[in-house]
């Protein structure tokens, strides 16, 4: 029964990642806790594996398609490692109730953002043409002389640290966090932001997983492996599905699902805090 649940849940996570370009990984922790009987600590560790492996596979595919700015993704990801390490260490020092309550709050935020996008689409706001950001000058250069755009360098440092901390603390790292961060801090063109974000997520997930290795109760690795393999395979099918269906309807359904899971998680976690 556990194996079947892991397969079904992995398929759902992968389909949403492939069809919508992100968001599915936020379901991994509630799935591991409420469907697969893992503790919150085990779930956030196992989720890093699901998120990291699926992102790595997606990053390779996006790089082959020419949609990844590898150098910038590596730089942002390496800067974010500090936040990922700090977040992973902090996660081991709080109660499981606090972890789940924080996760529920994050899911409510993500679900609200998705719902807002749907409302904007229905009003036709998405039809407005906005100037696309372009690749700008390097933040730091050493040749022919040293030059630093320090305000932008600080923005990259702060943004990457926050992204890494959320990845390490909650075991998430979806495009809903990283894509806006790349647009804000590095001014990437939108067509490169989603693919480049997968590089960042892979790095931060790996860093947080290394910190968590050997601490706390390990997750059920067999279950995590099944969830990861199914998610990765379903992500490929989801990408093909996106070409055949109305993605706005998929996004609307996913927003409802995320909000529903968030309310359920909050209903279980918040009373335990009181």
Image (tube, rainbow, N blue to C red):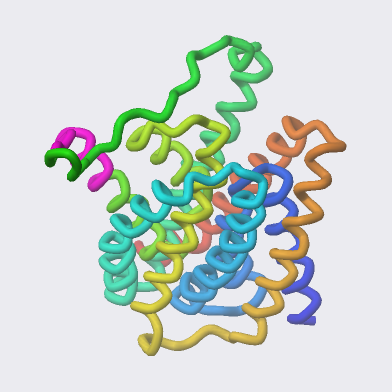
Residue 250, above or below 132: below
Residue 252 located left or right of residue 46: right
The residue located at (68%, 42%) in the rendering is 20
Q: Quadrant of the C terminus?
A: bottom left
Residue 34, above or below 80: below
The residue located at (55%, 63%) in the rendering is 51
Q: Is residue 214 visible?
A: yes
Number of disc labels:
0
**Which one is in front, 177 or 252?**
177
**Which one is in front, 77 or 176?**
77
The residue located at (32%, 76%) in the rendering is 92
**Which one is in front, 1 or 200?**
200
Q: Is residue 108 visible?
A: no
- Name the spot of residue 141 as percent of width and height, x first: 21, 41
Extreme-right residue of the structure: 244
Q: What's drawn in magenta, residue-wise?
A: 147-158
Give the image quarter of residue 5.
bottom right
Give the image quarter of residue 221.
bottom right
- Name the spot of residue 225 as percent of width and height, x first: 65, 79
Query: What secondary structure do most residues of the magenta stretch adopt?
Result: helix
């Amino acid at each position: 029964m556990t194996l079947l649940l892991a397969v079904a849940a992995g398929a759902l996570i992968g389909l949403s990642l492939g069809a919508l370009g992100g968001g599915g990984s936020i379901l991994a922790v509630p799935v591991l806790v409420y469907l697969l009987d893992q503790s919150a600590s085990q779930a956030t560790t196992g989720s890093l594996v699901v998120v990291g492996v699926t992102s790595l596979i997606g990053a390779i595919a996006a790089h082959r398609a020419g949609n990844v700015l590898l150098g910038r993704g590596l730089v942002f990801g390496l800067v974010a490692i500090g936040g990922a390490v700090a977040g992973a260490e902090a996660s081991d020092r709080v109660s499981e109730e606090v972890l789940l309550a924080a996760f529920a709050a994050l899911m409510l935020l993500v679900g609200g953002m998705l719902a807002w996008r749907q409302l904007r689409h229905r009003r036709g706001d998405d039809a407005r043409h906005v100037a696309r950001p372009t690749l700008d000058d390097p933040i730091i250069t050493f040749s022919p002389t040293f030059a630093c755009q320090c305000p932008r360098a600080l923005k990259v440092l702060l943004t990457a640290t926050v992204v890494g901390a959320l990845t390490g603390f909650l075991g998430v790292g979806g495009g809903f966090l990283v894509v806006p961060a790349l647009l804000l801090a590095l001014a990437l063109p939108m067509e490169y932001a989603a693919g480049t974000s997968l590089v960042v997520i892979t790095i931060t997930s790996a860093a947080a997983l290394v910190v968590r290795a050997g601490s706390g109760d390990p997750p059920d690795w067999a279950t995590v492996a099944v969830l990861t393999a199914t998610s990765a395979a379903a992500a490929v099918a989801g990408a093909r599905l996106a070409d055949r269906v109305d993605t706005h309807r998929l996004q609307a359904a996913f927003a409802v699902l995320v909000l529903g899971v968030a309310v359920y998680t909050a209903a279980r976690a918040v009373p335990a805090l009181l």
